[in-house]
Image: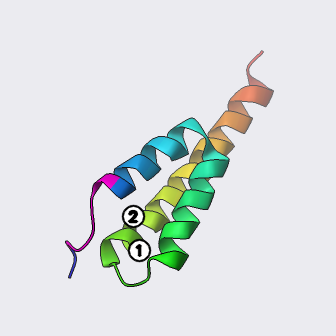
């Protein structure tokens, strides 16, 4: 069922991924690999991983291109 699980867990993951991409990446991977029985966590875990990678790449670009 799509709505199994608590929606607070993925929301917390998105916030963590925005603040600290490395911890967000670990959090998203934990949702994907450890919570295999809940489809909600699987879907949002992948999106949290994507967001963490995007934030990391954007922060590197801004760090090394903006004077």
Residue found at x 55% / y 36% = 19
Residue stretch in magenta: 3-8
Q: Secondary structure at mark 2?
A: helix
Is disc 2 in contact with disc 1, using a CB cutoff of under 8 Å? yes
Q: Is residue 6 above or below residue 2?
A: above
Residue found at x 80% / y 29% = 64
Percent from the top left, x then y, of residue 54? 58, 48
Percent from the top left, x then y, of residue 10? 37, 56
Q: Is residue 13 left or right of residue 61?
A: left
Dividing the picture into quadrants, the one containing residue 44 is: bottom left
- Disc 1 marks which residue? 42
Q: Residues within 10 Å of mark 1 (few under 14, many from 20)?
A: many
What is the tally of numbered marks visible in this picture?
A: 2
Residue found at x 27% / y 62% = 6
The quarter of the image holding the C terminus is: top right
The quarter of the image holding the N terminus is: bottom left
Q: Is residue 26 left or right of residue 51?
A: right
Q: Residues within 10 Å of mark 2 (few under 14, many from 20)?
A: many
Q: Is residue 60 left or right of residue 40?
A: right
Q: Is residue 16 magenta?
A: no
Q: Secondary structure at mark 1?
A: helix
Residue 44 is marked as 2
Q: CA distance from mark 2 to mark 1?
A: 6 Å
Q: Is residue 33 above or below residue 55?
A: below
Q: Nearer the viewer, residue 57 or 27?
A: 27
Q: Is residue 65 above or below residue 55?
A: above
Residue found at x 63% / y 39% = 58
Dividing the picture into quadrants, the one containing residue 36 is: bottom left
Q: Nearer the viewer, residue 3 or 55?
A: 3
Name the magenta segment's main secondary structure.
loop
Percent from the top left, x then y, of residue 57? 67, 45
Q: Residue furthest top?
A: 67
């Amino acid at each position: 069922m799509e709505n199994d699980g608590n929606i607070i867990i993925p929301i917390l993951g998105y916030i963590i991924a925005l603040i600290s991409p490395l911890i967000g990446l670990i959090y998203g991977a934990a949702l994907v690999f450890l919570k295999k029985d809940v489809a909600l966590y699987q879907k949002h875990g992948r999106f949290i991983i994507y967001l963490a990678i995007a934030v990391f790449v954007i922060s590197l670009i801004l760090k090394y291109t903006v004077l």
